[in-house]
Amino acid sequence: MTRDELHAQKLLKEAEQAHLQLHTRRHFLKESAMGLGALAIGSLLGSCGQSALDKMAKEAANTGFDPLRDFDPARPLLPKAPPFAARAKSVIYLHMAGAPSQLELFDYKPELMKMDGQDCPPSLLEGKQFAFITGVPKMLGPQATFKQRGESGAWISDHLPHFSTMADEVSFLKAVTTDQFNHAPAQLLMHTGTPRLGRPSMGSWVTYGLGTENQNLPGFVVLTSGGSFPDAGKSVWGSGFLPSVYQGVQCRSEGDPVLFINDPKGMSRDLRKASIEAINQANAATYKEYQDPETLSRISQYEMAFRMQITAPEVMNINDEPDYIHEMYGTQPGKSCFANNALLARKLVEKGVRYVQLFDWGWDAHGDHAGNSLNLGIINKYRSVDKAMTALLLDLKQRGLLDETLVVWGGEFGRTPMMENRNGVQNPYKGRDHHTDAFTLWMAGGGIKKGFTYGETDEIGYSPVSGKVEAFDIQATILHLMGINHEEFTYPFQGRPFRLTDVGGRVIEEVVA
Amino acid sequence: MLGNFHPVIVHLPIGFLLLAILFQWIGRRASYAHLRLSVPVILVLGMISALLACVTGLAISGSADYPEELLGWHQWMGIGTTLLSLGMFWAVQRKEAKMTNLFSVLLLAGVTVTGHLGGTLTHGEDFLSFGKAEAKPTLAPIADIQSAHAYNDLVQPIFEARCVSCHGSGKQKGKLRLDQPDYILKGGEDGAVVKAGDAENSELIKRLLLPGDAKKHMPPIQEAQLTDTEISFLHWWIQSGLGFKQLVKDLRQTEADKAVLLALQQQSQQTEDDAATAGKGNSSGSGKLSATSKTAASGAGVKPVFTLAASIPAEAVKPADPALVDRLKANGVVVLPVNASSNYLSLNFVTVDKQVPDSLLNLLAGIREQLIWLKLDEVEVTKAGYAAIGKLDKLTRLQISRGNLSDETISALSGLKNLQWLNIAGSSVSLEGFRQLGSLTNLKQLFLYKGGLTDSEWSALQQLFPKVQIDTGNYRLPLLPGDTSLVK
């Protein structure tokens, strides 16, 4: 056989395999039912599989918010009106992956300072699980100087000199808790509502429910910095059981924002158009045969990719911003950094992107080496986000975007008031272990009170005393601000309707203006 | 511009004049007599720099909001000090020993007092206080504010701590007494100070809310001030009908009022906590942890003046013509109901070409009743197009930013009576242009980033729209050493 013949044979084989993959159980039943003429099987079909799902979807439609009612698989990202009056149209979620220490930034604990270096009281350790702490650790006082800021008098440490000026713009949640003490599950819980893999992320839920205003850009964009992906990997912006079109589109912050967005040399725009049309025709034929709505999503994604080639390079190119904007954010053009991503997030929201998720990696302040020590490496993390996140708030504000954009900042859990002693031995540098019971998160813009603090912790920042909230509450609040009731917002899957907040969640009305 | 140098230059005369006085005095001892030779030269330098300080000081005085009275004192003391230095120079030159001594003492006093007044102007009243001379708290700790007596437990202690020293049995400034219910209702020489159920128009609240430097602001700015929570509380108390006999829970309250009350409760407990921790000392090792309110000193938070949800009119409207909506969508306009159960519409031109055709804007007349939010960012609109937008009088939120809005076209917007929020960032509109928007009485927020007005024009603009929150943007963040360096 010649090379060409081999190649053709391979292609044929691939086509055959693709064809077989598209053969679902339904096709098999349908075809065998026809072949055998066994009508009984037909009646079985009526009570299981897709038709049951359809029935369930219909029931859901009657009770709650069901975007499937006017779901157009050919244009899955078309914007939809929120079920009730929204306070925000877009979300920018700044996630500090690795979990920043509340005790060095926002949760001021002078009592902890007095206990510095003493053995941890046994009552704090009973029945608790830590990632690394074993035996009796020593207490560790705040490695920061705190001051009260602004009219609201919120405590913010000197580690965030720029953000300190924003005290009167944000609402702090001081008593956030989680039940996961490892990064990946805790990140998944924060963004997908479960510590296990497989559920849709919040950005997917929001774009599924509301679509996005600009059809030339993705509705859910993910930007990462800090040199590494969040521990939970791409699942933390996955679409789970929602149609795959709703998963986060990860853009790169250096080079082309989306790989291969520019046509290769010699490929003209017309040729690109013709090839996409050909692919879409093939897909349309497949859809006609198998009726899988994912095929229609696929077609629409090709179409969007074609439109994005024009819009995305312009929107995603931060180099055209004036110098003083670059100076305000502290960007490093050409490099990958949080500041670049913050500026990009503003540009995307300005152009109507629904949900922008930032992950900045490297906040895991264990103190087992200098790079993650509270008084060395982690200080550089503070510096790398302080100016940029302040600039983001100011920039949104001056453009009139802050009242329609919700900005959320936080990690996946907090840090212990004890110094970490890995395997019972004091770590060489100042560091804290993972802590699930209390940490701080802030929100701003989009219908959030300004200069407000909700929740407080005990005098060493170990446990909540009042205003305790959990991941479900934060998710419920974000959905609420977007005009969605989290209890009615469901998707049918595996025989039951699913919610982002599962069976939990309370809208934190206290912070809603 | 010139005025900006005042804070720098003032330090020169302070240094020179103090040095001259010092040399003059030390020179009394024979072994240091040679120092006196340099006194006239230093005095001349002092005089020249003092004169410069006066000139720059006068220049800066007009440009910023300083308390008038304080400013007046500082100004005349400054001029007086300059004259005193001239006097001392004269006395030194004439070798009039007695006069020199007299002038040097006066000059020392002049420099000190003027300098202190200047410091107070820029850094505030308490800039010299060592430690914290905190005002005594108004309220005793309250465990449960809802079961507190509104007047006896809350209002009366606040008045007692902050007002009664001038408006009580001792002094009755403005013939007003706030120490007993009868007197509170009676008011002062200009009539009633509280109107039950109408806090907005109650003189008491108005005075509390005036800016600190206003003459009529109460309490006078040098005295201890009420906290925002206390003012919000008094506002609620008046609004809910001036209950002198009721408990808090028996008075009318909205959700927001409840938050204010809770904040007041927290405030009262906080002062208790401060006292408690001061006496307690180190409580570590006990293992049992109690609540501490020291963590958050925050009040009730501030609501933004504009929220999307609150800008949707309460009255219902009939649905928009679906054919027209489809036509707009076909032209790339994002058309959405503001929420699923409302017929009011939100429009965004984000996916429309930069040059918006008049024909498209003219279509909007057909959905005039429904259209409340309109967003046109980075677009160019013709004069006729602006005229079409100007007819959409149901709009509550309008953005025409980074486009070509100008003095000539802005008048079109003067008819948008329901507008609460206007963003015309990046437009070249002059002060004259803005005068045409005086008719927008419902306006709450105005965004003018990159507006290109001068500083004095900005303040004139704020006077033109006294109730509107104007955001001129153009924020800058200083470059701090930590921003570009790494800890190693």
Image (cartoon, rainbow, N blue to C red):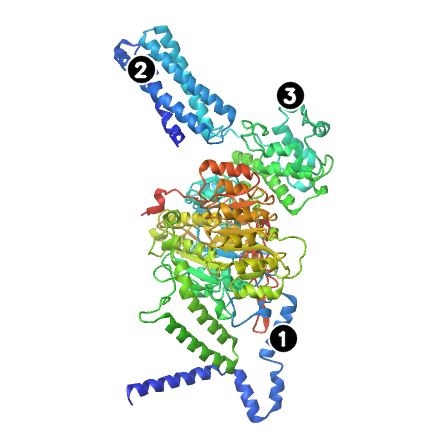
Q: Secondary structure at mark 2?
A: helix
Residue B279 location (% of width, % of height): 53, 33
| Residue B328, picture quadrant | bottom right
**Few, some or many residues within 10 Å of mark 2 (<14, 14–19, 20+):** many
Chain letter of the residue beneath label 1 in the structure image: A
Could you give the CA–CA distance between mark 1 and mark 2, rounded to whole angstroms?
A: 99 Å
Residue drawn at (53%, 85%), measured in percent from left and top?
A27
**Residue B63's disc number:** none
**Few, some or many residues within 10 Å of mark 3 (<14, 14–19, 20+):** few
Residue drawn at (52%, 86%), measured in percent from left and top?
A28
Residue B443 in the image: above or below residue B153: below
Q: Which residue is mark 1?
A: A55
Q: Which residue is mark 2?
A: B23
Which sits earlier in the primary sequence, circle 2 or circle 3?
2
Residue A225 in the image: above or below residue B421: below
Chain letter of the residue beneath label 2 in the structure image: B
Same chain for mark 3 and mark 1? The answer is no
Could you give the CA–CA distance between mark 3 and mark 1, rounded to whole angstroms?
A: 79 Å
Q: Which residue is mark 3?
A: B171
| Residue B150, picture quadrant | top right
Quadrant housing the N terminus of chain A: bottom left
Q: Secondary structure at mark 3?
A: loop
* Foreground pick, B373 / A287: B373
* Foreground pick, B289 / A275: A275
Amino acid bearing label 3: Lys
Residue located farthest toward the front when viewing the structure as drawn: B384
Could you give the CA–CA distance between mark 2 and mark 3, rounded to whole angstroms?
A: 49 Å
Amino acid bearing label 1: Lys
Amino acid bearing label 2: Phe
Chain letter of the residue beneath label 3 in the structure image: B
